[in-house]
C-alpha cells in the first residue's frame, strides 16, 4: 500500500514538474522547447491511438475467427449426418482417383522405358539436352 501511495505521489510530482516546465516555457518565451514538448506530447498521443486501433482490430479479428469456428462446430454437430458422411466419402474417392491416375502414369512411363531397352531413357535425355 505504501508503494502504491509513493507511486501516486511520484506521478503527481512528475505531472506538476511537467506543468511547471510548460508554464515556465510559456512565461519565459522558450518557444523551441515548448514546440519540442508539444510535438513529443502529440507524437505520444498518436502512437497510443495507433496502438489502441491495432489492439481493437486484433480483438475484432479474433472474435470473428472465434465466431466462425463456433458456427462451423455448430454445423458439424447439428447438421445432417448422412450429408457429412456422403461429402467425406466423395472427397476420399476424388483423392484416391487422383492417386490412381498418378500411379498409372508412373507405371506407363516405367513400362515404356523398359520396352526400349534403355533407349527410351537415352532419347528422353537427348531431347532434354537439345532443348
Image (cartoon, grey):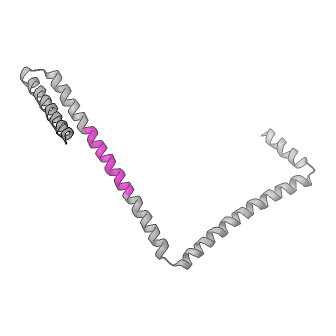
Q: Would you place residue 11 above or below residue 63 in this image?
A: above
Nearest the eye: 104 or 59? 59
Relative placement, left or right, of 90 versus 14 is right
- Give residue 12's position: percent from left, percent from top: 14, 35
Number of callouts in the render? Answer: 0
Q: Residue at x 59, y 75 (%)?
A: 86
- The quadrant in which residue 36 appears is top left
Whether residue 49 appears in magenta in the rendering, the answer is: yes
If the image is split into quadrants, where does the C terminus sit? top right
- The quadrant in which residue 3 appears is top left
Please state the extent of the stretch shown in magenta in the rendering: 46-62
Residue placed farthest to the front in the image?
2
Q: Would you place residue 123 above or below residue 73 in this image?
A: above
Relative placement, left or right, of 61 versus 9 is right
- Give residue 11's position: percent from left, percent from top: 17, 35
Nearest the eye: 90 or 116? 90
Relative placement, left or right, of 130 versus 9 is right
- Give residue 79's position: percent from left, percent from top: 48, 76
Whether residue 19 appears in magenta in the rendering, the answer is: no
Q: Residue at x 79, y 42 (%)?
A: 128
Q: Residue at x 18, y 30 (%)?
A: 38
Relative placement, left or right, of 43 versus 111 is left
Q: Would you place residue 123 above or below residue 33 in this image?
A: below
The main secondary structure of the magenta stretch is helix
Q: Residue at x 88, y 49 (%)?
A: 120
Nearest the eye: 110 or 23? 23
- The quadrant in which residue 20 appears is top left
Nearest the eye: 48 or 101? 48
- Give residue 35's position: percent from left, percent from top: 17, 26
If the image is split into quadrants, where does the N terminus sit? top left
Amino acid at each position: 500500500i505504501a508503494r502504491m501511495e509513493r507511486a501516486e505521489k511520484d506521478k503527481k510530482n512528475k505531472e506538476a514538474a511537467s506543468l511547471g516546465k510548460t508554464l515556465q516555457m510559456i512565461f519565459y518565451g522558450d518557444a523551441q522547447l515548448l514546440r519540442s514538448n508539444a510535438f513529443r506530447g502529440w507524437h505520444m498521443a498518436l502512437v497510443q491511438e495507433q496502438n489502441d486501433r491495432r489492439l481493437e482490430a486484433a480483438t475484432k479479428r479474433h472474435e470473428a475467427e472465434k465466431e466462425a469456428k463456433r458456427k462451423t462446430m455448430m454445423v458439424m454437430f447439428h447438421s445432417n449426418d448422412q450429408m457429412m458422411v456422403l461429402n467425406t466419402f466423395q472427397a476420399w474417392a476424388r483423392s484416391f482417383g487422383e492417386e490412381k491416375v498418378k500411379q498409372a502414369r508412373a507405371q506407363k512411363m516405367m513400362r515404356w522405358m523398359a520396352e526400349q531397352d534403355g533407349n527410351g531413357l537415352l532419347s528422353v535425355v537427348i531431347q532434354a539436352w537439345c532443348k
